[in-house]
Amino acid sequence: MSNISRDQKIETMPELMSFFENRLKEKLYTALPAIVQSFDSAKRRVTIILAIQREITDGTTREIQQLLNVPVLFPAAAGFSIFLPLKSGDSVMVVFSQRGIENFKQNYKINLSSNNSVMSIDSAVAIAGFGQLEITPADDNSASLQTNDGKNAVIVSDNQVKLSVDGATATLTNNLFETNVTIKAPDFMSDSGISLTGHVHGGVQTGSSNTGVPE
């Protein structure tokens, strides 16, 4: 805890309590933006540097140290995950747990607090997306998974799902599939089990063409 400077005069008990309260707040962390330095995609951990410097009582600033092995929060449950490829220089929001979470990070089950710290810098988790504030929505009225420029997107609305790739589109509704691109597949099969590539019409007379046997 910082000492009282020689130039600072504390004459009353409320002033003294206020001084110690402010010094205590300097040791507590709640949420801060941070800059990604590196990302372990398999473990979903980042190395980050907090983007807000600390101001010392003499008016100078001090950079906060690099934080290692910080878990990244992506939506995930029941064996399903949404993944985003964080890159060096991306910004995230870092939240500091009210109690130490090192024990919890070992198996993500009920545990005792790993230490007696409160909102410590060592109990950080990162939320991806903070800083990506300006995008071109692929559709203003629908949910989408998209590139920031909106050119490539999966768009989900009330009555359809649309895939868009740089102007090429494929749209699925409850009874229709429409696309403006060529469809290639090894085969097409009808509901009755008839193969497009293997289907041969009977009773066709042999001639100069191959009418009965698709090329």
Image (cartoon, rainbow, N blue to C red):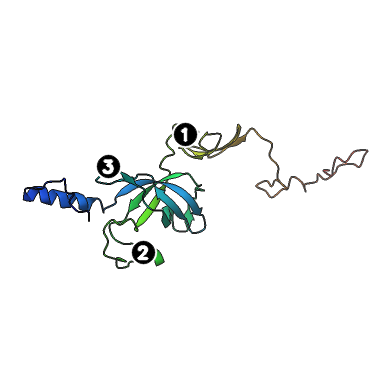
Looking at the rendered image, the disc whose residue lies closer to the viewer, 2 or 3, is 3
In the rendered image, residue 174, in percent from the top left (x then y), is placed at: 53, 40
Q: What amino acid is found at the position of numbered circle 1 in the picture? A: Ile
Left or right, residue 193 beside residue 85: right
Identify the residue shown where x is 40% and y is 46%: 34
Identify the residue under disc 2.
102
Looking at the image, is 58 positioned above or below residue 113?
above
- Quarter containing the N terminus: bottom left
Q: Secondary structure at mark 3?
A: loop
**Mark 2 and mark 3 residues within 8 Å of each other at the beta carbon:** no
In this orientation, which residue lies closer to the viewer: 126 or 3?
A: 3
- The answer to which quarter of the image holds residue 59 is top left
Mark 1 Cα within 10 Å, few/some/many (few <14, many 20+)?
few
Q: Earlier in the sequence, mark 3 or mark 1?
A: 3
Q: Quadrant of the C terminus?
A: top right
* Residue 166 at x, y percent in the picture: 60, 33
- Residue 76 seen by the camera: yes
Residue 74, visible in the rendered structure: no
The answer to whether 163 appears left or right of 94 in the picture is right
Spatial distance from mark 2 to mark 3, Cα to Cα? 34 Å
Residue at which label 1 appears: 135
The numbered mark at residue 59 is 3
For the point 49% across and 53% down, the residue is 39
Amino acid carrying label 2: it is Glu
N-term-proximal mark, 2 vs 3: 3
Coordinates of residue 50 in the picture (x, y in percent): 38, 48
